[in-house]
């Protein structure tokens, strides 16, 4: 399924990436394009022969992974037309033997690819009617319990809950993009200070609950509607800890769909794209998916990426397939805007001027002082495994043909622009007592906020836990 560079040295150096792609292809049901063979046994007439290139272009796609100066790049690619599917490397597209080898289908106007080829993942393009199903499959992979409300028992185990308690005090966790609440609690349980916080929360609150939601297939306002239905009969005082995209879900829930809770709920927003993120902006698509692949490799620390614990390569591959099914991966706006809009969970948090959903959310905000809190960081590291961050932000560090790959205009935590994390609305600025700013750091990034002692300490202080 996954084709690799013929060099044994390159294949050995990137075996974790190749294993990760194999796992992703299996999990997402991405099949090799064997159904579209065009050898002499299937080509029946001349009219079909004349249109074979168009049909192949329509039905087949390929994602390539290259490495340039230590940075992974995802790009469109193509394969020799169908010699592989027939098991005969000497067949041309028509099925006749050729000394020159198989012909290739080329796309007009393609630039020369940059970097060393690592792997190629061929796939069948999705029909428009299949896109929603493909996104749901990806969401199930990332968030197995989406749509469910669960709660921690006294032993710290998550179990399905009947609903939010009708009264008393409730602590609710809402996860972020490409994630689930098991990841948040896993990070807390992985440290002593996190374990102490969970223990104190179980004593302080009548219920410690979690809400899992789809992060790609639907918009945050749909998730918020689901949450509002789950809490509609409750009069409990609810405190919320939300991460990343979960901050948008929480704001839609509290500020638009269940305003009776607005004055009595406290919410801690950890690395949340309150004013959007450049990672989800359509013009940054090519760079954004490459960025996710690099984060995946850096988080792997040399371990096999086939474990399924790291979601970023799955997201990059799944979204790549959706976009490539409707337009070229290299297409310019507004065509690519329309393509990215097919992934509503991303498009709703795009940091662009005409994001009407975000504009609506940020309008008519009640004073957040005393009830909203924020955690932010700007990640910069000189560690070789993390240095890729420069290539997606620093113009001087990038090759000339990467001009469209710039994702962030300034400080960020690898996923969200740092200024966006405290940008509730222009007229409101949170006081310093309600923010935790890690500043520029090589330790804290989007995926490890809940492992930090300072994060846990502020959670305990702001929510009066312990």
Image (cartoon, rainbow, N blue to C red):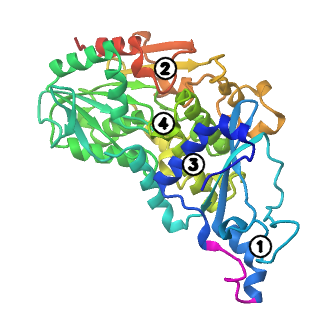
Q: Which residues are magenta?
A: 36-45
Answer yes or no: do the residues labelled 2 and 1 have beta carbons within 8 Å? no
Asked if the stretch drawn in magenta spans residue 419, the answer is no
Task: State the image quarter where residue 431 is shown.
Answer: top left
Q: Position of residue 71 (x, y in %)?
A: 70, 32
Answer yes or no: do the residues labelled 1 and 4 have beta carbons within 8 Å? no
Task: Please give the name of the residue rendered at 48% of the width and 36% of the height, measured from the top-left corner.
Answer: 310
Find residue 376 and name its label. 2
Distance between mark 4 and mark 3 Cα atoms: 13 Å
The N terminus appears in which quarter of the rendering?
bottom right
Could one spot residue 252 in this view of the protein?
Answer: yes
Distance between mark 2 and mark 1 Cα atoms: 54 Å
- The front one of 326 and 365 is 326
Compared across the picture, whether 283 is left or right of 27 comes to right
Distance between mark 1 and mark 4 Cα atoms: 38 Å
On screen, residue 140 above or below 182: below
Answer yes or no: do the residues labelled 4 and 3 have beta carbons within 8 Å? no
Nearer to us of marks 1 and 3 is: 1
The C terminus appears in which quarter of the rendering?
top left
Q: Label 3, secondary structure: give it.
A: helix
Distance between mark 2 and mark 4 Cα atoms: 22 Å
Q: Label 4, secondary structure: give it.
A: loop
Q: Label 2, secondary structure: give it.
A: strand
Q: Position of residue 299 (x, y in %)?
A: 53, 28
Determine which residue is flagged by label 4. 310
Circle nearer the N terminus (2, 4): 4
Circle nearer the N terminus (4, 3): 4
Q: Position of residue 316 (x, y in %)?
A: 57, 45
Compared across the picture, whether 181 is left or right of 318 comes to left
């Amino acid at each position: 399924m996954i084709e690799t560079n013929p060099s044994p040295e390159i294949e050995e150096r990137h075996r974790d990436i190749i294993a990760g792609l194999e796992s992703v292809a299996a999990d997402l049901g991405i099949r090799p394009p064997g159904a579209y063979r065009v050898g002499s046994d299937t080509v029946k007439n001349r009219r079909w022969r004349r249109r074979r290139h168009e049909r192949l272009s329509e039905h087949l796609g390929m994602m390539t992974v290259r490495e340039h100066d230590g940075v992974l790049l995802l790009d469109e690619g193509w394969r020799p037309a169908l010699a592989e599917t027939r098991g005969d490397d000497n067949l041309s597209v028509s099925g006749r033997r050729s000394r020159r080898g198989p012909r290739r289908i080329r796309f007009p106007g393609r630039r020369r690819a940059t970097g060393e080829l690592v792997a190629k993942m061929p796939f069948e393009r999705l029909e428009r009617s299949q896109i929603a199903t493909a996104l749901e499959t990806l969401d199930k992979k990332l968030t197995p319990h989406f749509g469910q409300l669960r709660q921690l028992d006294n032993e710290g185990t998550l179990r399905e809950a009947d609903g939010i308690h009708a009264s008393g005090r409730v602590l609710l966790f809402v996860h972020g993009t490409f994630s689930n609440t098991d990841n948040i609690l896993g990070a807390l349980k992985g440290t002593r200070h996190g374990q102490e916080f969970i223990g104190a929360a179980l004593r302080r609150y009548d219920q410690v609950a979690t809400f899992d939601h789809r992060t790609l297939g639907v918009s945050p306002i749909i998730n918020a509607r689901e949450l509002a239905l789950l809490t509609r009969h409750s009069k409990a005082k609810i405190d919320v800890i939300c991460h990343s995209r979960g901050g948008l879900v929480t704001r839609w829930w509290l500020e638009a769909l269940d305003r009776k809770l607005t004055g009595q709920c406290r919410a801690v927003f950890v690395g949340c794209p309150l004013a959007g993120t450049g990672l989800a902006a359509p013009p940054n698509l090519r760079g954004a998916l490459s960025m996710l692949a690099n984060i995946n490799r850096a988080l792997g620390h040399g371990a096999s990426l086939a474990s399924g614990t790291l979601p970023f390569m799955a997201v990059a591959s799944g979204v790549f397939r959706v976009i490539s099914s409707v337009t070229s991966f290299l297409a310019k706006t507004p065509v690519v805007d329309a393509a990215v809009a097919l992934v509503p969970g991303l498009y709703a948090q795009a940091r662009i001027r005409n994001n009407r959903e975000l504009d609506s959310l940020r309008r008519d905000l009640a004073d957040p002082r005393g009830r909203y809190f924020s955690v932010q960081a700007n990640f910069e590291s000189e560690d070789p495994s993390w240095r890729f961050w420069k290539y997606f932000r620093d113009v001087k560090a990038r090759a000339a043909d990467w001009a469209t790959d710039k994702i962030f205009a300034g400080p960020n935590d690898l996923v969200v622009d740092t200024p966006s994390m405290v940008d509730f609305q222009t007229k409101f600025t949170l006081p310093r007592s309600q923010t935790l700013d890690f500043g520029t750091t090589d330790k804290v990034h989007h995926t490890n906020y809940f492992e930090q002692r300072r994060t846990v300490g502020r959670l305990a202080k702001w929510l009066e836990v312990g």
